[in-house]
Image: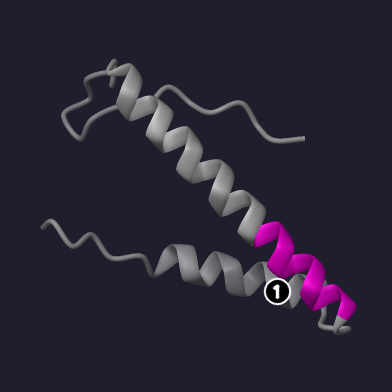
């Protein structure tokens, strides 16, 4: 079961209200979730420790860089 997406806010704290932006974000999140799930299942089939896989996925997310700064 996928979690309900949050209400998105700008850096200034304003609610993102553009329907198209929210739709694109939701589509991207669904695609990412499916890719991560596929990677996780493949790793389990390869007998990789599930917790190690999750830890590495967290590491990838934590190392994301904002290219627009």
Vertical position of residue 46 compared to residue 29: above or below: below
Relative horizontal placement of residue 5, taking residue 55 as reference (left or right): left
- Residue 32 as seen in the image, left or right of residue 43: left
Instruction: Assign the magenta stretch its main secondary structure.
Output: helix
Indicate the position of residue 3 as horizontal and vertical percent values.
65, 32
Residue at point 51%, 71% (across, down): 59
Q: Position of residue 54 (x, y in %)?
A: 68, 67
Residue for point 44% across, 64% down: 62
Compared across the picture, whether 38 is left or right of 68 comes to right
In magenta, the rendered stretch is 36-45
Q: Where 69 falls versus 3 (above or below)? A: below
Residue 68 lies in the magenta stretch: no
Q: Which residue is mark 1?
A: 53
Is 41 situated above or below 21?
below
Q: Position of residue 60 (x, y in %)?
A: 48, 70
Q: Which quadrant: the N terminus?
A: top right
Residue 43 lies in the magenta-colored region: yes
**x, y percentage for residue 21?**
31, 28
Q: Is residue 42 above or below residue 37?
A: below
Number of numbered discs overlaid on the protein picture: 1
Residue 59 versus residue 29: which sits nearer the camera? 29
């Amino acid at each position: 079961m996928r979690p309900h997406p949050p209400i998105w806010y700008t850096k200034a704290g304003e609610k993102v209200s553009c329907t198209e932006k929210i739709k694109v974000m939701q589509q991207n999140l669904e695609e990412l979730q499916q890719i991560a799930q596929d990677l996780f299942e493949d790793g389990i089939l390869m007998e990789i420790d599930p917790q190690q896989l999750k830890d590495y996925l967290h590491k990838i997310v934590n190392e994301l860089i904002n290219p627009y700064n």
